[in-house]
Image: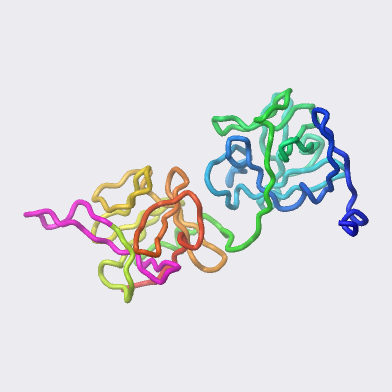
């Protein structure tokens, strides 16, 4: 701690009569910003917009907090860089350069969270509806918890549908394969529904999937049935598919893939052979793609 204090400047922050010494290392660097509602500040991939999202933070919720003589710039993960900007009317968006409107004054709160005041004297604020703006007074909606993020198996890009599509087997991190289990209906040639589980290899007919691309999303089909999931996380097969049954493929740095559907649900393989969707991405949500003919 002594060496830290010798080489890193300390600042005295005050809040409602509560004062604490902090260094810039307590807030700068690679950070996620989690609101009082448990949502994360997000920068949009293809536009200069920002909002809040629930679930596990990944690339678009990763920020760099750059220190500038007591103020900070909140830099999104984009390249070229984009910065969080406060406008006079209280709206918040992104800009590709830094000026006064992209600078924020950090202030620590008594609960250990941080608040950020714009050059207009307004506070960065999280809405329960996942909107983000600035407001004149500071309360719990203006509290953000800063957590470091690392580059361990990060998402490289979400726009890899051309690479992922085709005839594929999906092998989990447990060495098992995503397997279709159709439920045949009496007097009918094709099943209309089915179940899904994970089975050991080698991959055969019921582990053979067709991945078709639709813009930046894909559907997964085996035995003429589509891979679907319910809001509660149940994964099943159906002969009918809807827009919310499309999956977004994410290529990971370790060469694996992850698949996310609506409601921030990730396709997940359990060690015991189950398949479901979960809110948080880990090893069980990584799949290696193998071609088949």
Which residue: 36% across, 57% down?
Answer: 275
Give the farthest residue toward the bottom: 202
Q: Is residue 207 above or below residue 125?
A: below
The residues colored magenta run: 168-195
In the foreground, 13 or 178 = 13
Residue at (53, 41) in percent of width and height:
54
What's the image's color scheme? rainbow
x then y, percent, for residue 60: 60, 48
Note whether 187 is above or below 46 in the view shown. Answer: below
Left or right, residue 182 beside residue 107: left
- Residue at point 33% right, 72% down? 200
Q: Provide residue 181's location: percent of width, then percent of height.
A: 24, 61
Residue 124 lies, in percent from the top left, at 70, 32
Q: Quadrant of residue 143?
A: top right
Nearer to the camera, 211 or 232 = 232
Numbered label tally: 0
Tell me the quarter of the picture where residue 115 sits: top right
Viewer-side residue, 42 vs 85: 42
Quarter holding the C terminus is bottom left
Residue 138 position (above or below residue 245):
above
Furthest-right residue in this view: 6
* Residue furthest left as drawn: 187
Percent of width and height locating residue 5: 90, 53
Q: Quadrant of the N terminus?
A: bottom right
Q: Is residue 194 magenta?
A: yes
Residue at position x 52%, y 45% in the image:
55
Per the image, is 243 magenta? no
Lateral position of residue 173 relative to residue 119, left or right: left
């Amino acid at each position: 701690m002594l060496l830290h204090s010798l080489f890193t400047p300390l600042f005295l922050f005050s809040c409602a009569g509560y004062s604490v010494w902090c260094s810039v290392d307590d807030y700068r660097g690679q950070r996620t910003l989690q609101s009082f509602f448990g949502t994360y500040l997000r920068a949009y991939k293809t536009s200069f917009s920002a909002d809040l999202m629930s679930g596990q933070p990944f690339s678009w919720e990763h920020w760099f907090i750059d220190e500038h003589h007591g103020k900070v710039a909140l830099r999104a993960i984009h390249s070229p860089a984009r910065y969080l900007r406060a406008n006079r009317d209280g709206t918040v968006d992104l800009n590709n350069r830094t000026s006064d409107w992209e600078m924020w004054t950090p202030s620590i709160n008594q609960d250990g969270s941080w608040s950020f005041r714009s050059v207009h004297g307004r506070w960065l604020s999280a809405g329960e509806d996942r909107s983000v703006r600035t407001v004149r007074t500071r309360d719990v909606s203006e509290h953000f918890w800063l957590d470091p993020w690392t580059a361990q198996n990060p998402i490289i890009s979400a726009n890899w549908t051309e690479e992922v599509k085709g005839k594929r087997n999906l092998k989990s991190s447990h060495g098992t394969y995503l397997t279709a289990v159709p439920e045949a209906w009496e007097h009918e040639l094709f099943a209309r529904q089915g179940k899904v589980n994970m089975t050991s290899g080698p991959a055969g007919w019921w582990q053979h999937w067709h991945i078709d691309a639709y813009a930046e999303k894909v559907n997964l089909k085996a035995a003429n049935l589509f891979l679907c999931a319910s809001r509660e996380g149940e994964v099943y097969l159906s002969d009918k598919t809807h827009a919310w049954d499309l999956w977004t493929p994410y290529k990971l740095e370790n060469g694996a893939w992850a698949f996310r559907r609506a409601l921030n649900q990730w396709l997940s393989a359990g060690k015991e052979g189950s398949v479901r969707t979960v809110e948080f991405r880990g090893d069980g949500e990584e799949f290696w793609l193998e071609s088949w003919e």
